[in-house]
Amino acid sequence: MIDVHEILVIVAVVVLTAGLVTGLAAVITGWLLPGPGRAKVARPRMWGYGTLIGQAGIGTFLFVGPLHGPSMEHVPYAMAGMAVFAFGLYVQRLATRAAA
């Protein structure tokens, strides 16, 4: 029987994979998912880089932090992952502004 922890790991891997696919699609082809937010993105490739950076950060946070276990020795690495995630969000925000 699959326990809750295994389900959470599977969900995290699926969500991270979806983010990686959309980020790579934006970087390689400039394609974005359809939706209302698409019109706000002025630079899709930059948005894709922000997505990839964010996915690396949140993946580090999840798999070194909460999904790894309650050990406090990994907290600095998990928090660094959160900082990388925040930087990815910042890059995505920059992609919504008009190109200089």
Image: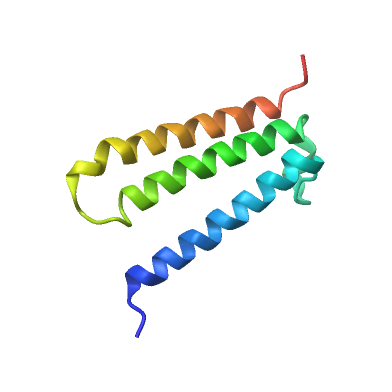
Q: Is residue 21 above or below residue 49?
A: below
Q: Quadrant of residue 73?
A: top left
**Picture quarter with the C terminus:** top right
Percent x, y for residue 50?
Answer: 61, 34
| Residue drawn where x is 25% and y is 43% of the image | 74
Closer to us: 41 or 4:
4
Q: Residue lying furthest front in this view? A: 28
- The image shows a total of numbered marks equal to 0
Q: Residue lying furthest top in this view? A: 100
Q: Is residue 96 above or below residue 64?
A: above
Percent x, y for residue 87?
Answer: 51, 29
Percent x, y for residue 16?
Answer: 54, 54
Q: Is residue 3 above or below residue 51?
A: below
Q: Tell me: 63 left or right of 42.
A: left
Q: Tell me: 22 left or right of 32.
A: left
| Residue drawn where x is 68% and y is 50% of the image | 22
Q: Quadrant of residue 28?
A: top right
